[in-house]
Amino acid sequence: MADLIDLVISAHGGMDQWNSFNHIKAHLKVDGHIWKIKGKTGLLSDGIFEANTHEQLSGYQSLVAPYQKSTWEPGKIILEDADGSEQRTLLNPRKSFEGEVLETQWNDFQPHYFSNYAWWTYFTAPFNFKLPGYQLKELTPWQQDGETLERLEVTFPDYIETHNKVQVFYFDKNYLLRHHDYAPDILQSVPSSQYVWDYKNFMGINIATTRRIYLRNEDASYNPIPVMVSIDVVNVEFSH
């Protein structure tokens, strides 16, 4: 029998199709309680996320005021104002979160850093698991709401900036991602679960267009209220 990761990648469009692209462009609508907690309500509510599909290089252009544009790579994030007249750079942005508590208000760079690395992880999975250094482990199947979900534990390599080192991905009977457990280091390692649905095919790649992130309980259930982050995908384009 094929390994779980191979079945999963095939279900999401296949490695050959993914490797035929180098760039993703996604129009996103974003909301959720975390932005209120951090004093950034509406900042990322409507915009364009673009990224290299094979390495961590990405950016976000807001379509609403204050129309900020960010460019990110591991270890550096750049912010530009709406008219491009001012460009600011923050090196080692992850260090800026040290010593924070959940209620700490974020500075201008932090929501862009958080979103760029998170979205890169979300929109390149599961294909990114084939990059060098990832460690994969099949876990025992998980029973939830009368359904059996296959589980894959993913240990991310040190060169990838992500929520935390070890994360668990759950797949349905069609080997599509159903949800994803993690505990973001920069959010005090709060256990979280991202649930995804409404898959659509974009240029041969199957992508969930509705994403909701909740706080996770000790028994692996989740709290439906509040929705910590919501991501609705309006459109996706891939290019070479």
Image (cartoon, grey):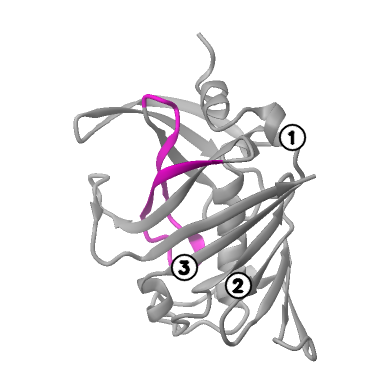
Name the residue rendered at 75%, 41% in the picture.
21
Name the residue rendered at 40%, 45% in the picture.
198
Q: Which residue is mark 2?
A: 112
Which amino acid, by three-letter code, is at mark 2? His
CB contact under 8 Å: marks 2 and 3: no
In magenta segment, residue 182? yes
The circle on residue 19 is 1
Which amino acid, by three-letter code, is at mark 1? Asn
Pick whichever of labels 2 and 3 is earlier in the sequence. 3
| In the displayed structure image, the side of residue 31 where residue 133 appears, left or right | right
The circle on residue 234 is none
Q: Give residue 105's position: percent from left, percent from top.
A: 46, 84
Task: Return the residue nearer the eye: 54 or 238.
Answer: 238
| In the displayed structure image, the side of residue 190 where residue 143 appears, left or right | left
Q: Residues within 10 Å of mark 2 (few under 14, many from 20)?
A: many
Cα separation, mark 1 vs mark 3, equals 28 Å
Above/below status of 107 relative to 239: below
Pick whichever of labels 1 and 3 is earlier in the sequence. 1
Which amino acid, by three-letter code, is at mark 3? Val
